[in-house]
Image (spheres, rainbow, N blue to C red):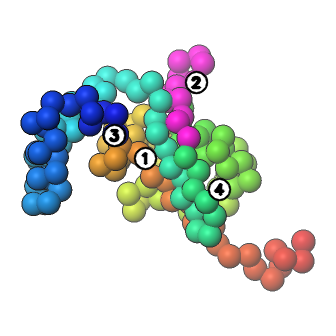
Amino acid sequence: MRLALACLAALSHSPIACSWATDKPELYWQVNGKLRPKVSFRYVPVRVCRPFKPFIQEPVLPKHPDGTDRSLGDVLHQLIPEVVVSPTGPVRAQVLVQGITPPLETPISWLAYNCSHPDNFLYICVLQPPPTAADRLV
């Protein structure tokens, strides 16, 4: 984001700061439109947040080598295979993006375009239940 802001004209910096200070999101999105790709992403900047663990921050390819869209399940399986054993199988945690639980089949590029934060990262929260006594015995 810092590099993208450096590329904007000096006059564009003020509307971004002003939009944050005055709580005017329409002004922010007007300027942010210049920062966001219109058609496709080369990489999707993702941050996976888990309680009591360091977050995972990696650029993720939005498409598979064969050209098909990479899903949320694919990305989570790649980044945290101990929680998401297979891209379409059961998940051992609650997955939240912007406070909702999207289907694992949701394309990551769609989530990035529609659910990214103002810093243009897609934040994915993975909430695992605490281990039970039965889990500790295994």
Q: Where 128 falls versus 5 (above or below)?
A: below
Would you name the residue on which mark 3 appears? Answer: 2
Would you name the residue on which mark 2 appears? Answer: 64
Q: Is residue 89 visible?
A: no
The span from disc 3 to disc 4 (Cα, nearest Å) is 35 Å
Q: Secondary structure at mark 4?
A: loop
The span from disc 1 to disc 3 (Cα, nearest Å) is 16 Å
Label number found at residue 22: none
Tag 4 or tag 1, which sits nearer the N-term? 4
Tag 1 or tag 2, which sits nearer the N-term? 2
Q: Is residue 48 visible?
A: yes
Q: Amino acid at mark 2?
A: His
Q: Amino acid at mark 4?
A: Val
Q: Looking at the figure, which quarter contains the C terminus?
A: bottom right
Please tell me whether mark 4 or mark 2 is closer to you in this view.
2
The span from disc 2 to disc 1 (Cα, nearest Å) is 19 Å
In percent of the image, x 58 and y 24: which residue is there?
A: 64
The image position of residue 39, as x and y in percent, is 31, 23
Q: Secondary structure at mark 1?
A: strand
The image position of residue 133, as x and y in percent, is 81, 83
Instruction: Report the span colored magenta.
Output: 58-69
Would you name the residue on which mark 1 appears? Answer: 122
Please tell me whether mark 1 or mark 3 is closer to you in this view.
3
Q: Determine which quarter of the picture holds residue 9.
A: top left
Disc 1 and disc 3 in contact, CB within 8 angstroms: no
Furthest-bottom residue in view? 133
Would you name the residue on which mark 4 appears? Answer: 91
In percent of the image, x 71 and y 48: which residue is there?
A: 81
Disc 4 and disc 2 in contact, CB within 8 angstroms: no
